[in-house]
């Protein structure tokens, strides 16, 4: 099993989760993070660290977020590894909790 970053991370991109990851499985895109399912060791450390509550165990991904399982796998092959915490975007708090953000995902 792996963990999955879901829609609420889009335009929030808090990186608190990255700081606790022991295997550097996070990858960074312009306004979203993903988890590489091949690298994730299911340690559970990232999930409680996410201020946006956007990380779920694969088996617990909400029904309306299931597409993010494949999206994490796809984008983790394209985006670079992020191994250190960074500042969130200045407007991250404004985007936290906004629904239907997939349209804003930058690849």
Image (cartoon, rainbow, N blue to C red):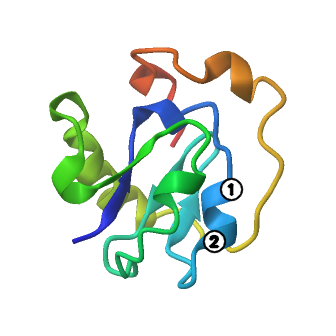
Q: Is residue 82 visible?
A: no
Q: Position of residue 28 (x, y in %)?
A: 60, 57
Q: Is residue 7 above or below residue 88?
A: above
Discs 1, 2 touching: Cβ within 8 Å: yes
Q: Position of residue 8 (x, y in %)?
A: 48, 31
The image quarter containing residue 86 is bottom right
The image quarter containing residue 68 is top left
User: Residue shown at 15%/33% (left/top)?
Assistant: 63
Q: Is residue 5 left or right of residue 98?
A: left
User: Residue shown at 47%/56% (left/top)?
Assistant: 47
Q: Is residue 99 above or below residue 52?
A: above
Q: Secondary structure at mark 1?
A: helix
User: Residue shown at 62%/30% (left/top)?
Assistant: 11
Q: Which mark is residue 98?
A: none
Q: Is residue 24 left or right of residue 34?
A: right
Q: Residue furthest front?
A: 48
Would you call the spot at circle 1 few (<14 residues within 10 Å), some (14-19), or many (20 or more)? some
Q: Secondary structure at mark 2?
A: helix
User: Residue shown at 35%/75% (left/top)?
Assistant: 42
Q: Is residue 58 visible?
A: yes
Residue tagged 1 = 16
Residue tagged 2 = 20
Report the number of discs. Answer: 2
Q: Quadrant of the N terminus?
A: bottom left
Q: Position of residue 106 (x, y in %)?
A: 54, 36
Q: Is residue 14 above or below residue 75?
A: above
Q: Is residue 35 left or right of residue 50?
A: left
Q: CA distance from mark 1 to mark 2?
A: 7 Å
Would you call the spot at circle 2 few (<14 residues within 10 Å), some (14-19), or many (20 or more)? some
């Amino acid at each position: 099993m792996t963990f999955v970053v879901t829609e609420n991370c889009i335009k929030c991109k808090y990186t608190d989760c990255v700081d606790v990851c022991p295997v550097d499985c996070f990858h960074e895109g312009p306004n979203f993070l993903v988890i590489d399912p091949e690298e994730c060791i299911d340690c559970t450390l990232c999930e409680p660290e996410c201020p946006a509550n956007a990380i779920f165990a694969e088996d617990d991904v909400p029904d309306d977020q299931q597409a993010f399982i494949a999206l994490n796998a796809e984008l983790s092959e394209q985006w670079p590894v992020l191994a250190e915490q960074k500042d969130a975007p200045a407007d991250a708090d404004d985007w936290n909790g906004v629904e239907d953000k997939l349209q804003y995902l930058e690849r």
